[in-house]
Image (tube, rainbow, N blue to C red):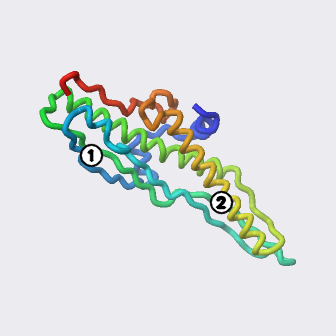
């Protein structure tokens, strides 16, 4: 696990996935995945997708006198949507196939909620280390605030890339630790399947 993700998650609450969904108001978009065979399940395009509106705003901005300006950059999560399978099926599924497919579906959900956890941890770390910006004028202030926002956004994007690299997009979720750890997003098919 990268040092960044480990440090971010060390302070994160160990909430279960349902609690993360509720606390961060994650919108779940679920779809039925119907394929012709078990082997086709892993050929589907990205099985899940987390879309996170990571953003910043400026709080408490005001003039100080002598033309100087101040305010604090604050990061938050805007709209958060997770697209996941509601069901995974193929013709002739056995009871064991249904159990494995449901386990895969749950693993995909857990991986995508991991993206949300990482985003929230980055947000919290950025906000914990924030200090007011003081600039000689409103234009310099806006430039510094925008730069801080871009830097924070890049940190978020890098943490998301690190998470996917660590877990191989969920296929190696067991490599993660703490609340990110979980089952791999892989499906073992019977020889006939």
Please give left or right for residue 148 compared with residue 108 in the image.
right
Quarter holding the C terminus is: top left
- Give percent across and percent down for residue 188: 29, 26
- Say whether marks 2 and 1 touch (CB < 8 Å): no
- Residue at the outermost top position: 191
Please give left or right for residue 173 compared with residue 189 in the image.
right
Identify the residue shown where x is 36% and y is 35%.
Answer: 107
Identify the residue shown where x is 15% and y is 32%.
Answer: 93
Between the C-alphas of marks 2 and 1, the distance is: 35 Å
Judged from the image, the secondary structure of the residue bearing numbered disc 2 is helix
The residue at which mark 1 appears reads as: 86
The tally of labels here is 2
Judged from the image, the secondary structure of the residue bearing numbered disc 1 is strand
Identify the residue shown where x is 30% and y is 32%.
Answer: 103
- Residue at the outermost left position: 92
| Label located before the other in sequence (2 or 1) | 1
- Give percent across and percent down for residue 8: 60, 40
Residue 189 vs 50, above or below: the answer is: above
10 Å crowding of disc 2: few (<14), some (14-19), many (20+): many
Residue 163 vs 120, above or below: the answer is: above
Quarter holding the N terminus is: top right
Nearest the eye: 85 or 15: 85
Residue 149: quarter of image: bottom right
Residue 110: quarter of image: top left
- Give percent across and percent down for residue 125: 64, 47
The residue at which mark 2 appears reads as: 149
Residue 105: quarter of image: top left
- Give percent across and percent down for residue 14: 49, 37
10 Å crowding of disc 1: few (<14), some (14-19), many (20+): some
């Amino acid at each position: 696990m990268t040092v960044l993700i480990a440090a971010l998650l060390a302070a994160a609450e160990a909430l279960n996935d349902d609690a993360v969904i509720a606390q961060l108001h994650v919108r779940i978009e679920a779809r039925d995945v119907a394929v012709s065979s078990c082997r086709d399940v892993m050929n589907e395009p990205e099985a899940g997708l987390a879309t996170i509106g990571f953003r910043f705003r400026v709080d408490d901005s005001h003039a100080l006198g002598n033309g100087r300006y101040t305010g604090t950059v604050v990061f938050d999560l805007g709209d958060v949507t997770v697209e996941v399978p509601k069901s995974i099926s193929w013709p002739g599924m056995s009871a064991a196939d249904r159990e494995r497919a449901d386990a895969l579906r749950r693993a995909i959900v857990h991986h995508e909620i991991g993206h949300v956890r990482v985003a929230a941890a980055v947000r919290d770390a950025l906000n914990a280390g924030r200090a007011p910006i003081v600039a000689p004028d409103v234009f310099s202030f806006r430039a510094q605030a925008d730069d801080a926002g871009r830097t924070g956004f890049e940190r978020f994007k890098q943490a998301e890339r690190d998470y996917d690299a660590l877990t191989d997009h969920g296929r190696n979720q067991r490599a993660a630790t703490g609340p990110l750890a979980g089952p791999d997003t892989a499906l073992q098919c019977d020889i006939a399947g």
